[in-house]
């Protein structure tokens, strides 16, 4: 007898981008920050370490209050999670029965499909229209939950408020989850839409712009009635003391965040220009990464492998419609110079076709 649920047996587990600790590697494959987090966050983590014998505050109250002041939302409309991935899991467990339908777009963040499989939820992928726009005619009646990263990953596309509204209004029977993992690099947020729509949820992470991927912190903004229910399925002590202290201090140092984001944005725009000069298709991006198209899967894979051989790690997706692309995270100015130099070298050595 096999004790494992059928849906778990038949699902494939999520495969995250490669981890690598070596300082010799220019790690541009997981959209982590290549800049340090706020020095105040590091100090706060160190200070919190002295109280590790005690359980953390179950409700992450101080962190939620800091989020409330930064984002202008009542603290009762904020939940903290062990990474935004935990928040996404809680949303599934709280809102989806087996057999319900979840919807996401393609190409987009694929972890949603893993969560759906775990919960035995039917998962429907809707194609974007043209170059990654929300379809004009969108009817998602019956769907329990719909996911939209804004900016989108891995394309970098920013959806204007009008498109986000169209999405929200297309899901009358369920939640529209706006995953704002990269919103600090676009400057646009759907948090104000919480006042207008009952079915909007906004999810944020500290893993990208704040440079705290190693601490695992996410935030969820939603109406209180929904958060009260989500509370029931949250791990009681989901954020440890270090994470709560670090995230709170990072939030209260918005000057640091702005400084880092402005450097990433400047590097991003510079690299987009350089990639286009090399004759490549580089998509406009509102995130801390760029999707680059090479025209054929063979060429993209070869570039990926050659970069890797030169200690530059980027992301290749063997996925419909983007299997001729690589995604490169925007790191420090030095990282980007290395990436550009190595890529230029690889392209110049390509056999003439
Ligand atoms: C990185 C990422 C996440 C995961 O964030 P964590 O807080 O590290 O779990 C969620 N959604 C998208 C679109 C991401 O790119």
Image (spheres, rainbow, N blue to C red):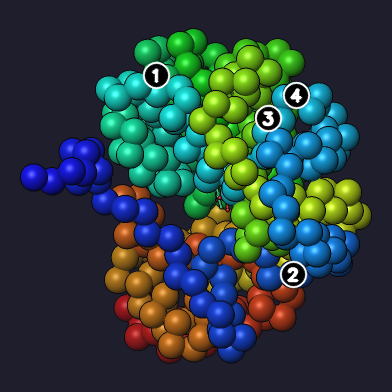
Determine which residue is flagged by label 2.
35
User: Mark 3 = which residue?
Assistant: 221
Horizontal arrangement in the rendering, residue 73 relative to residue 237 (left or right)? right
What residue is at 45 percent from the left and 82 percent from the top?
A: 308
Circle 2 packing at 10 Å, graded few (<14), some (14-19), many (20+), is some
Q: Earlier in the sequence, mark 4 or mark 3?
A: 4
Earlier along the polypeptide chain: callout 2 or callout 3? 2
In the picture, the quarter occupied by the C terminus is bottom left
Q: Quadrant of the N terminus?
A: top left
Sequence-first disc among 1 and 3? 1
- Which element carries disc 2, helix, strand or loop? loop
Marks 1 and 4, the one that precedes in the sequence: 4
Tell me which label, 2 or 4, sits earlier in the chain. 2
Looking at the picture, tell me which residue is in the foreground, 277 or 185.
Answer: 185
Q: Residues within 10 Å of mark 1 (few under 14, many from 20)?
A: many
Q: Which dot, 2 or 4, sits closer to the camera?
A: 4
Is residue 210 in view?
no
338 and 48: which one is in front?
48
User: Residue 129 is drawn in which quadrant?
Assistant: top left
Rendered location of residue 35, percent (x, y): 74, 69
Kindly report the distance in space between the C-alpha atoms of the residues bearing marks 4 and 3: 9 Å
Between label 4 and label 3, give the one nearer the viewer.
Answer: 4
Q: List x then y, in percent, for residue 137.
A: 44, 18
According to the picture, the residue beneath numbered tag 4 turns out to be 76
């Amino acid at each position: 007898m096999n004790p494992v649920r059928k849906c778990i047996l038949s699902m494939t587990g999520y495969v995250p981008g490669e981890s690598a600790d070596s300082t010799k590697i220019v790690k541009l494959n997981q959209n982590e920050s290549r800049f340090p987090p706020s020095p105040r966050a590091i100090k706060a983590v160190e200070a919190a370490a002295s109280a590790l014998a005690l359980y953390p505050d179950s409700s992450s109250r101080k962190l939620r209050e800091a989020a409330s002041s930064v984002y202008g939302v009542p603290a009762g409309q904020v939940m903290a999670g062990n990474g935004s991935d935990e928040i996404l899991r809680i949303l599934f467990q709280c809102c989806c029965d087996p057999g319900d339908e979840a919807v996401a777009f393609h190409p987009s963040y694929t972890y949603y499909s893993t969560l759906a499989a775990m919960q035995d939820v039917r998962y429907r992928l809707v194609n974007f229209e043209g170059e990654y726009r929300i379809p004009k005619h969108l009817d998602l009646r019956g769907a329990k939950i719909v996911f939209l990263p804004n900016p989108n990953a891995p394309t970098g596309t920013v959806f204007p408020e009008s498109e986000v509204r169209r999405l929200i209004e297309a899901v009358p029977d369920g939640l529209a989850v706006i995953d704002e993992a990269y919103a600090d690099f676009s400057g646009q947020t759907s948090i104000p839409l919480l006042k207008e729509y009952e079915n909007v949820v906004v999810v944020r992470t500290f893993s990208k712009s704040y440079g705290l991927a190693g601490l695992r912190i996410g935030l969820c903004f939603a109406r209180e009635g929904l958060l009260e229910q989500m509370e029931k399925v949250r791990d009681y002590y989901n954020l440890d003391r270090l994470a709560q202290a670090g995230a709170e201090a990072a939030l209260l140092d918005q000057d640091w965040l702005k400084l880092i984001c402005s450097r990433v944005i400047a590097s991003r725009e510079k690299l987009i220009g350089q990639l286009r000069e090399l004759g490549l298709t580089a998509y406009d991006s509102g995130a801390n990464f760029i999707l680059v198209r090479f025209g054929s899967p063979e060429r993209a894979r070869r570039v990926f492998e050659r970069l890797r051989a030169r200690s530059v790690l980027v992301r290749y997706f063997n996925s419909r419609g983007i299997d001729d692309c690589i995604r490169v995270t925007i790191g420090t100015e030095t990282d980007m110079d290395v990436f550009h130099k190595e890529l230029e070298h690889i392209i110049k050595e390509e056999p003439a076709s």
